[in-house]
Amino acid sequence: MISVLTSRIGKLLIPLLLLAAAGFAIANFSVLTEQWQSLLSNTLPIISLTIGLFLCIQFSRSRYILLLGLLITVALLSDSFQSLLTTLQYELLISAAMINGLLFSLTKDRNLLSIHGVLRVGFIGIQVAFFAYLSHQHSDALASLINTPLFTLPSDWQAYNKLPNTLLIITASVCLLHLLLSLVLNDSLQSIFFGCQLGILGMASGYQSDMMVPFLLSSCSLMVVLSVLMDSYHMAYRDELTGLPSRRALNQLMLSLGRHYTIAMMDIDHFKKFNDTHGHDVGDEVLRMVATKVGKVTGGGKPFRFGGEEFTVVFPGKSMDQVNDHLEELREVIDHYEMIARTAKRPKNDNSKDKDRHKAHRGKGRNTPPLSVAISIGLAERNTQLKKPEQVLKAADEALYRAKKGGRNRISR
């Protein structure tokens, strides 16, 4: 389930499903009693926003805090304060909210109390002052520009949108750009921003429903909540360098193993030599390469990074004889892989002499012989003597030691 949600398309499922749920709730809201209608409209946004802000503050997710601030602003403008603004001011603020949402998604998380956070908040304040000036001094020209009839929506669509053509183009373009960013960058944050931008577009559309704003605001807040929780899970149970599940995830799996399973412990041969000879950057490249291959192991194995240069693969319901060929194939794939270490990055001071030196260094790197990488593997399965997962894991580690002592680049039981 987690792998589906972390796929490129799967990351869009959460925002789209929550928006679909909000749309369904809005369409069927009238079947509820007035008491339930009042309770949901008043408490659901407050609860979801409170949880979202608490988690964002707890995990220092400043971009989501700013996003929630934009959502609250648009909700208040669309629901409670729209009558206090002119049509032009409202349209300018909605456009600004959408564009700022795009900009915030492309920045880094910074403490809002730091100089970076103050600058971002100040940037918003400057925009508000600037738009206020424009709407006061050049209202006629701006109104004429924004309300220019560029196209006509089908009559069936007009009931769901009251935005002028120019504003609709701006908001739709921002949503489309966020969708493309989500697909290209494969970033869950971009997916959540995309969903919230759709929520902002829905709240600003002018569709006549008492629950349009509360349900969309709640839906977008829940997107942020689920995203922060999933990111926290990922940080806790995934190794940052290799992307494989971490030792904590392995310990969790071991609690649910049945009566038949095999555990493989594997270690990169002579890994210290890579660090000593080529540096820790190359050592990290080796770890990532091996992790990529281990992550593709066949036979139903579940791979983990155990720690350092060690990896673990658990085969639920399999014996050593059943998994030996799959591990032998993995060992051969890594042994035959020709890995070229990356050279240093181009210097920041990129003048002509630096370019020439970099080209020479890069060319030299291409003539460097490929690195020879190999792994040793130790195997153990549950039996009458090894009944607990910890015992099987220790036996696999002892088998790994025998593989190392026996010459490395081999499988031992």
Image (tube, grey):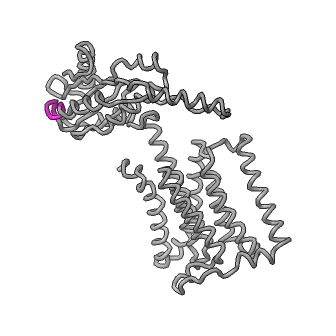
Residue 207: x %, y % from top left: 58, 78
Number of marks in the rendered image = 0
Task: Determine whether, in the image, residue 260 is placed left or right of residue 345.
Answer: left
Which stretch did the figure color magenta?
Answer: 319-324
Q: Is residue 236 magenta?
A: no
Determine the residue positioned at 56% across, 57% down: 193
Residue 378 shows in the view: yes
Quarter occupied by residue 109: top right
Q: x%, y% of residue 58?
A: 58, 42
Give coordinates of residue 44: x percent, y percent: 55, 62
Instruction: Report whether residue 44 is seen.
Output: no
Image quarter where the C terminus lies is top left
The residue lying toward the viewer, choosing from 111 and 347, is 347
Q: Quadrant of residue 353?
A: top right
Q: Characterize the magenta stretch by its predominant secondary structure.
A: helix
Residue positioned 59% across, 54% down in the render: 50
Between 229 and 34, the residue placed more toward the observer is 229
Q: Residue furthest right?
A: 137
Residue 76, x across and y down, in percent: 67, 66
Q: Which residue is farthest top?
A: 405
Indicate whether 51 appears above or below 368: below
Q: Is residue 216 left or right of residue 82?
A: left
- Looking at the image, residue 326 lies above or below residue 216: above
